[in-house]
Image (cartoon, rainbow, N blue to C red):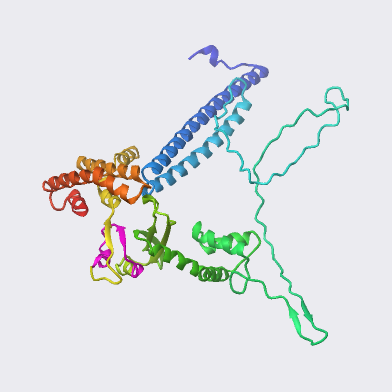
């Protein structure tokens, strides 16, 4: 150890000076550490932002119908949100630490350009009182040169009000009959809520998945207590009022020449547990083959996945149905069915899915990075996915063309690829055991 450096001064003034120097050095070290932490947080937030943008682009190009890629984007967005907030906190902490030091350079994050405010928003111009005298000489002969404008986005808190609609009564001096204007129209019976309030309750419940009890709690905090039963009554009334519109959409969807069908799981709270219900979707979209009919979708709900549900949904439909190989659809394809048989159009996306699960290199990389068990990848599955993706690429190139053009291109380009794929799958299937996952996937698609 250096004796001169470790020697303690004898007089109080020297001790104070040494203490001040050590404190200054400690502040500089703390400032340097805060700046380094802020830079690291900025890098992490930037990486998360780039990952989110890449995932969005991939989803836009390749996986618009992939639920897994949608969940990945949501998770990446949440990660970016947290890292961006942490980076701002660390930046402000670094500013405070640098302000206490003297020799440490400050740190300012490199932010992208802020989004411009939408033009349709109203503008409120607030003019600060200008100076009346010169700050230098005190003279009052001031002339305006220009102005600096700072724009800040602000929100007006939600305002509640009670609308009192008054209908005055008049009596006739001649016949004593009472005359009065007719009662105003109400969107729902009893008319306790205006149309804007009803729309907000319905959108919060079905569009933002906010249960009525949470809405009631928030409204009560705003000084407007609304009983849960009253809100539930309003939801039922609006649903009944919109039912004719729903039937028009249903009739439009079921009048299509071809439908796309699928179902997905829906968690439902039950007594002491969570049940798995089903949401059935039937989509009409004529745009891929140049059709003029507007796209539309119908959603149905059931507590289970029995085949009776799609059979009831499509009881009056006859046409082409593109769906997976769910057994519940089989009754729809019978020749003697009334009002007519439904022609099955198998779905390449569902056929590709089990192979993709055994060929997802990116998922394996994510698992490896997080320390999870890796999925055994199959080169056969990778090859099948590559061949099916080639078919998808052809479909993208002919999207929007007439049915005749699409048929010609499929016969010319797609048919040879499908025939080669069938030969390849049968060759590989002969080498696999019956219980192998690849064998199950091959038998599904064949």
232 left or right, relative to 223: left
Question: Is residue 119 in view from this perspective?
Answer: yes
Q: Closest to the observer: 252 or 76?
A: 252
Q: Where is residue 275 in the image (x, y as percent from the top left)?
A: 37, 64
Which residue is drawn at the image coordinates 28% and 69% (left, top)? 340
Q: Where does residue 243 sit, x and y in percent of width and height?
A: 49, 69
The location of residue 3, given as percent across then percent down, is 52, 13
Instruction: Write the residue at 28% across / 43% down.
Output: 389
Q: Foreground: 370 or 46?
A: 46
Where in the figure is residue 385, as x and y percent of width and height?
A: 26, 43
Outermost residue to the front = 404
Residue 359 in view in this figure: no
Residue 84 vs 336, above or below: the answer is above
Residue visible at 27% across and 61% down in the picture: 343
Q: Is residue 274 above or below residue 1?
A: below
Residue 325 painted magenta = yes
Marks counted in the figure total 0
Q: In this view, does 258 lie to the left or right of 205?
A: left
Q: Identify the residue at the far bottom of this view.
A: 175
Q: What segment carries the magenta color?
A: 312-334
> Residue 379 or 166: which is nearer the viewer?
166
Check residue 349 for magenta coloring.
no
Would residue 246 appear left or right of 12 to someone viewing this image? Answer: left
Name the residue nearer the viewer: 71 or 172.
Answer: 172
């Amino acid at each position: 150890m250096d004796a001169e450096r470790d020697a303690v001064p004898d007089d109080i003034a020297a001790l104070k000076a040494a203490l001040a120097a050590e404190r200054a050095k400690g502040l500089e070290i703390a400032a340097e550490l805060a700046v380094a932490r802020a830079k690291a947080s900025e890098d992490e937030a930037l990486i998360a932002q780039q990952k989110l943008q890449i995932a969005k682009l991939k989803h836009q190009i390749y996986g618009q119908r992939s639920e897994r890629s949608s969940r990945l984007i949501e998770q990446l967005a949440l990660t970016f949100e947290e890292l961006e907030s942490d980076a701002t906190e660390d930046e402000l902490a670094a500013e405070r630490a640098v302000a206490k030091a003297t020799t440490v350079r400050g740190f300012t994050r490199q932010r992208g350009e802020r989004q411009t405010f939408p033009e349709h928003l109203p503008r409120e111009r607030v003019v600060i009182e200008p100076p009346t005298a010169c700050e230098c000489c005190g003279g009052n002969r001031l002339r305006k040169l220009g102005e600096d404008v700072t724009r800040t986005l602000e929100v007006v808190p939600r305002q509640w009000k009670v609308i009192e609609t008054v209908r005055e009564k008049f009596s006739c001096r001649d016949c004593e009959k009472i005359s009065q204007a007719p009662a105003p129209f109400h969107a729902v019976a009893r008319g306790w809520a205006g149309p804007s309030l009803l729309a907000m309750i319905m959108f919060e419940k079905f569009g933002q998945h906010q249960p009525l009890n949470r809405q009631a709690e928030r409204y009560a905090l705003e000084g407007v207590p609304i009983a849960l039963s009253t809100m539930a009554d309003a939801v039922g009334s609006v649903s009944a009022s919109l039912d004719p519109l729903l039937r028009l959409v249903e009739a439009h969807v079921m009048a299509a020449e071809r439908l796309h069908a699928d179902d997905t799981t829906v968690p439902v709270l039950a007594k002491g547990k969570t049940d798995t219900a089903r949401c059935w979707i039937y989509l009409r979209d004529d745009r891929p083959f140049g059709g003029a009919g507007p796209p539309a979708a119908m959603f149905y709900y059931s507590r289970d996945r029995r085949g009776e549900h799609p059979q009831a949904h499509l009881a009056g439909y006859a046409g082409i149905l593109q769906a997976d190989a769910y057994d519940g659809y089989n009754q729809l394809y019978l020749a003697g069915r009334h009002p007519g048989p439904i022609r099955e159009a198998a779905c390449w996306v569902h056929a590709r899915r089990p192979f993709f699960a055994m060929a997802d290199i990116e998922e394996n990389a994510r698992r490896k990075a997080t320390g999870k068990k890796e999925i055994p990848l199959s080169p056969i599955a990778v090859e099948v996915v590559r061949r099916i993706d080639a078919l998808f690429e052809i479909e993208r190139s002919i999207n929007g063309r007439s049915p005749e053009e699409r048929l010609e291109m499929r016969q010319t380009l797609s048919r040879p690829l499908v025939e080669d794929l069938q030969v390849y799958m049968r060759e590989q299937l002969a080498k696999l055991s019956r219980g192998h996952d690849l064998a199950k996937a091959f038998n599904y698609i064949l």
